[in-house]
């Protein structure tokens, strides 16, 4: 088993080093070592909270109740998280011209905080609030969350976090950019994603169809592992990314 991981690490390092257009695709798993749990599974957020607060209809009808929970999860609990070596490693690979884009399903802003420049947020970003009436956007740090729900400074209507709730569509620009980066990828590096959230989960299949080599980092097998993954690097995101970069540095 250890030999197989070593072999896959060496191969993956060579493939990334020679890539013309590597694209990274990340999910909740990349932020687990930063202290942010995934939604599903052991220790997942939905084990403690009811996901209905992120259903658009429920939120609009019960804004105060929803916001009390949203504040606790996203603006108290998540807020202290810092990028880990997996985020930093992807930013480093972008600086070196190896990775051209990071498509993330995460909403925690940690790729940007790690220094990645071309970050495509498939599901939006929790650090920004958007008005449900006039679409005015405001950084959450400029909004008073002592009195809930927060109101738009322009039109006084209800504000919501600028990530998509259940029942909302994918932001168009992010969707189009993701398709572009998927079509152009000769290598697709998956980190910490189960492949169970549609439509984001289709992107790796599209990349594979377009001829990309699929490298996957995950401590558990995902929907992709036995289907499309060429090199499975079994382990935690920060640990494996560190080993991978060490290998690239030796080439
Ligand atoms: P997911 O598809 O993001 O699954 C999480 C995956 O992470 C699983 O495959 C799991 O095996 C893997 N994982 C667990 N620990 C890991 C580690 N240390 N290193 C690498 N991989 C690890 O599904 P989800 O958690 O159900 O999330 C649903 C949606 O909500 C996704 O779009 C997700 O990105 C988003 N979400 C975002 C955040 C965030 O912004 N940090 C947190 C929770 C959920
Ligand atoms: Zn407004």
Image (cartoon, helix red, strand yellow):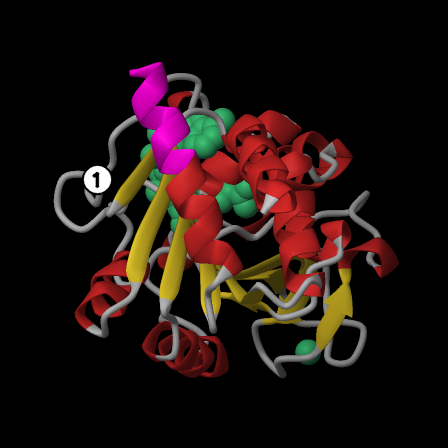
Check the image and report above or below for 77 versus 144: above
Residue sitting at x 27%, y 47%? 195
Residue at image point 71% right, 48% down? 148
Q: Classify residue 184 by image quadrant.
A: bottom left
Question: Majority secondary structure of the magenta segment?
Answer: helix
- At 62% from the left and 41% from the top, the residue drawn is 250
Q: Residues within 10 Å of mark 1 (few under 14, many from 20)?
A: many
* Image-quarter location of ligand 2: bottom right
Q: Is residue 110 above or below residue 83?
A: below
Q: Would residue 99 be found to the left or right of residue 40 on screen?
A: right
- Nearer to the camera, 245 or 226: 245
- Residue 181 in the image: x percent, y percent? 43, 75
Q: 227 or 112, which lies in front?
A: 227
Give the farthest residue toward the front.
Answer: 251
Q: Which residue is mark 1?
A: 225
Asked if residue 6 lies in the magenta stretch, the reply is: yes
Residue sitting nearer the eye, 204 or 146 = 204
In the displayed structure image, the side of residue 63 where residue 226 appears, left or right: left
**Quarter that holds the N terminus:** top left
- Extent of the magenta region: 1-9
Label 1 element class: loop
């Amino acid at each position: 088993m250890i030999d197989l991981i070593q072999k896959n690490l060496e191969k993956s390092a060579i493939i990334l080093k020679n890539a013309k257009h590597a694209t990274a695709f990340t999910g909740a798993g990349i932020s687990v070592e930063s202290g942010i749990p995934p939604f599903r599974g052991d220790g997942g957020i939905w084990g403690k909270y009811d996901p209905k607060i992120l259903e658009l209809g429920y939120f609009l009808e019960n804004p105060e109740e929803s916001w009390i929970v949203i504040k606790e999860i996203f603006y108290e609990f998540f807020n202290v998280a810092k990028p880990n070596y997996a985020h930093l490693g992807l930013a480093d690979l972008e600086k070196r011209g190896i990775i051209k884009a990071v498509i993330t399903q995460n909403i925690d802003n940690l790729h940007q905080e790690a220094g990645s420049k071309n970050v495509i947020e498939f599901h939006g970003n929790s650090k920004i609030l958007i008005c449900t009436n006039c679409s005015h956007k405001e950084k959450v740090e400029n909004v008073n969350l002592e009195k809930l729900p927060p109101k738009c400074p322009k039109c006084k209507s209800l504000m919501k976090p600028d990530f998509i709730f259940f029942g909302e569509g994918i932001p168009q620009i992010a969707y189009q950019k993701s398709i572009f980066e998927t079509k152009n990828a000769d290598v697709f590096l998956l980190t910490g994603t189960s492949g169970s959230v549609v439509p984001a989960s289709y992107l790796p299949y599209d990349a594979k169809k377009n001829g990309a080599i699929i490298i996957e980092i995950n401590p558990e097998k995902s929907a992709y592992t036995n289907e499309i993954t060429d090199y499975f690097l079994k382990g935690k995101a920060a640990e494996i990314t560190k080993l991978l970069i060490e290998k690239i540095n030796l080439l």
